[in-house]
Amino acid sequence: LYKSVFMKGVRIQYKPGQLSLGIEYLTGQQHDTNHELGTTHSAAGVICYSLLKGTKRFKPYVYTGGGFFEFKDFSKDVLGVAFYIGAGTELNITPTIKVLIESRYINLGPLQLEGKNELGILWGIRAYF
Protein backbone atom coordinates (compact mmCIF):
# COMPACT_ATOMS: atom_id res chain seq x y z
CA LEU A 1 0.00 0.00 0.00
CA TYR A 2 2.82 2.42 0.85
CA LYS A 3 6.59 2.41 1.31
CA SER A 4 7.00 4.77 4.27
CA VAL A 5 5.09 7.41 6.18
CA PHE A 6 6.11 10.49 8.14
CA MET A 7 3.56 11.12 10.89
CA LYS A 8 3.14 13.87 13.44
CA GLY A 9 0.94 14.04 16.48
CA VAL A 10 0.43 14.44 20.17
CA ARG A 11 0.44 12.18 23.24
CA ILE A 12 -1.21 13.13 26.53
CA GLN A 13 -0.09 11.10 29.55
CA TYR A 14 -0.90 10.86 33.22
CA LYS A 15 2.27 9.91 35.09
CA PRO A 16 1.87 9.46 38.85
CA GLY A 17 5.03 7.35 39.23
CA GLN A 18 6.97 4.77 37.23
CA LEU A 19 3.80 3.70 35.39
CA SER A 20 1.98 6.12 33.08
CA LEU A 21 -1.20 5.92 31.03
CA GLY A 22 -1.92 7.98 27.96
CA ILE A 23 -3.62 8.48 24.64
CA GLU A 24 -2.02 9.53 21.37
CA TYR A 25 -3.14 10.73 17.97
CA LEU A 26 -0.83 10.57 14.93
CA THR A 27 -1.50 11.61 11.33
CA GLY A 28 0.53 11.75 8.13
CA GLN A 29 0.23 12.01 4.36
CA GLN A 30 2.09 9.99 1.74
CA HIS A 31 1.70 8.36 -1.67
CA ASP A 32 0.96 4.66 -2.01
CA THR A 33 2.60 2.33 -4.54
CA ASN A 34 0.03 3.43 -7.17
CA HIS A 35 0.98 7.11 -6.58
CA GLU A 36 -2.37 7.92 -4.91
CA LEU A 37 -2.02 10.53 -2.13
CA GLY A 38 -3.59 9.35 1.10
CA THR A 39 -3.72 10.04 4.81
CA THR A 40 -2.84 7.74 7.68
CA HIS A 41 -4.48 8.22 11.10
CA SER A 42 -3.82 6.48 14.39
CA ALA A 43 -5.64 6.99 17.70
CA ALA A 44 -4.33 4.71 20.42
CA GLY A 45 -3.98 4.12 24.11
CA VAL A 46 -0.51 3.68 25.59
CA ILE A 47 0.95 2.28 28.84
CA CYS A 48 4.56 3.23 29.73
CA TYR A 49 6.82 1.87 32.48
CA SER A 50 9.96 3.80 33.51
CA LEU A 51 12.94 1.54 34.13
CA LEU A 52 14.82 3.95 36.44
CA LYS A 53 13.46 5.80 39.49
CA GLY A 54 14.40 9.31 40.56
CA THR A 55 15.41 12.35 38.56
CA LYS A 56 18.09 10.92 36.31
CA ARG A 57 19.22 12.80 33.19
CA PHE A 58 18.62 9.67 31.11
CA LYS A 59 15.26 7.88 31.71
CA PRO A 60 14.71 4.69 29.67
CA TYR A 61 11.23 3.20 29.49
CA VAL A 62 9.23 0.48 27.75
CA TYR A 63 5.70 0.84 26.48
CA THR A 64 2.84 -0.90 24.75
CA GLY A 65 -0.38 0.25 23.19
CA GLY A 66 -2.94 -0.15 20.50
CA GLY A 67 -5.94 1.34 18.87
CA PHE A 68 -7.56 2.56 15.67
CA PHE A 69 -5.44 2.75 12.51
CA GLU A 70 -6.73 4.05 9.15
CA PHE A 71 -5.27 4.38 5.65
CA LYS A 72 -7.69 6.73 3.82
CA ASP A 73 -7.95 8.03 0.23
CA PHE A 74 -5.36 5.59 -1.13
CA SER A 75 -5.98 3.21 -4.05
CA LYS A 76 -7.44 0.94 -1.36
CA ASP A 77 -8.85 2.32 1.93
CA VAL A 78 -8.06 0.18 4.98
CA LEU A 79 -9.00 0.63 8.63
CA GLY A 80 -8.88 -1.47 11.75
CA VAL A 81 -7.01 -2.08 14.99
CA ALA A 82 -3.22 -2.25 15.34
CA PHE A 83 -1.01 -3.00 18.35
CA TYR A 84 2.56 -1.98 19.16
CA ILE A 85 5.35 -2.46 21.68
CA GLY A 86 8.49 -0.38 22.06
CA ALA A 87 11.21 1.26 24.10
CA GLY A 88 12.42 4.80 24.46
CA THR A 89 14.21 7.30 26.61
CA GLU A 90 13.78 10.83 27.92
CA LEU A 91 16.66 13.27 28.13
CA ASN A 92 16.17 16.08 30.64
CA ILE A 93 16.58 19.60 29.29
CA THR A 94 14.89 21.31 32.27
CA PRO A 95 12.80 19.77 35.10
CA THR A 96 9.64 20.20 32.96
CA ILE A 97 10.98 19.94 29.37
CA LYS A 98 12.36 16.65 28.01
CA VAL A 99 13.47 15.31 24.63
CA LEU A 100 12.14 11.85 23.78
CA ILE A 101 13.40 9.19 21.38
CA GLU A 102 11.38 6.01 20.85
CA SER A 103 11.33 2.94 18.67
CA ARG A 104 8.28 0.72 18.23
CA TYR A 105 7.28 -2.48 16.51
CA ILE A 106 3.76 -2.24 15.03
CA ASN A 107 1.73 -5.31 14.07
CA LEU A 108 -0.57 -4.38 11.17
CA GLY A 109 -1.65 -8.01 10.60
CA PRO A 110 -5.37 -7.50 11.38
CA LEU A 111 -5.60 -4.71 8.73
CA GLN A 112 -5.24 -7.00 5.67
CA LEU A 113 -2.27 -5.10 4.22
CA GLU A 114 0.65 -6.54 2.26
CA GLY A 115 3.07 -5.54 5.04
CA LYS A 116 2.18 -7.01 8.42
CA ASN A 117 5.07 -5.69 10.51
CA GLU A 118 6.40 -2.14 10.76
CA LEU A 119 9.18 -0.44 12.69
CA GLY A 120 8.51 3.12 13.83
CA ILE A 121 11.01 5.69 15.07
CA LEU A 122 9.58 8.60 17.08
CA TRP A 123 11.18 11.74 18.48
CA GLY A 124 9.88 14.91 20.00
CA ILE A 125 9.62 17.23 22.96
CA ARG A 126 7.68 16.38 26.11
CA ALA A 127 6.41 19.05 28.51
CA TYR A 128 5.29 18.28 32.06
CA PHE A 129 2.77 20.49 33.84
Image (cartoon, rainbow, N blue to C red):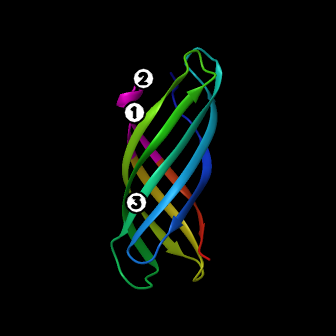
Callout 2, which amino acid?
Leu
Q: Is mark 3 on a helix, strand or loop?
A: strand
In percent of the image, x 35 and y 30: which residue is there?
Answer: 109
- For this view, does 79 lie left or right of residue 116? right
Q: Name the residue under label 1.
A: 108
Which badge, 2 or 1, is on the more N-terminal residue?
A: 1
CB under 8 Å between discs 2 and 1 = yes
Gap between marks 3 and 1, in whole Å? 19 Å
Residue behind mark 2: 113
Residue 81 in the image: state x and y as whole percent: 43, 36
Q: Which of marks 3 and 1 is nearer the N terminus?
A: 3
**Residue 77 placement (x, y as % from top left):** 55, 21
First in sequence: mark 2 or mark 3?
A: 3
User: Residue 2: within the magenta?
Assistant: no
For the residue labelled by badge 1, is the local secondary structure a helix, a strand or a loop? loop
Q: Relative to 6, say whether 18 is above or below.
A: below
Image position, residue 102 (x, y; %): 45, 57
Q: For the residues marked 2 and 1, what is the alpha-carbon distance in whole angstroms? A: 7 Å
- Which of discs 3 and 1 lies nearer the camera? The answer is 3
Residue 31 sits in quarter: top right
What's the residue at 56%, 36% (across, down)?
5
Circle 1: residue type: Leu
Depth check: give the residue in front, 103 or 16: 16
| Three-letter amino acid code at the position of disc 3 | Ile
Which mark is drawn over residue 47? 3
- Residue 11: image quadrant is bottom right
Judge the density around disc 1: few (<14), some (14-19), many (≥20) Cα neighbours within 10 Å: some
Which residue range is magenta in the image?
105-120
Describe the element under mark 2 as helix, strand or loop.
loop
Q: In this view, does 101 lie to the left or right of 117?
A: right
Q: Residues within 10 Å of mark 2 (few under 14, many from 20)?
A: some
Q: In which quarter of the image is the C terminus?
A: bottom right
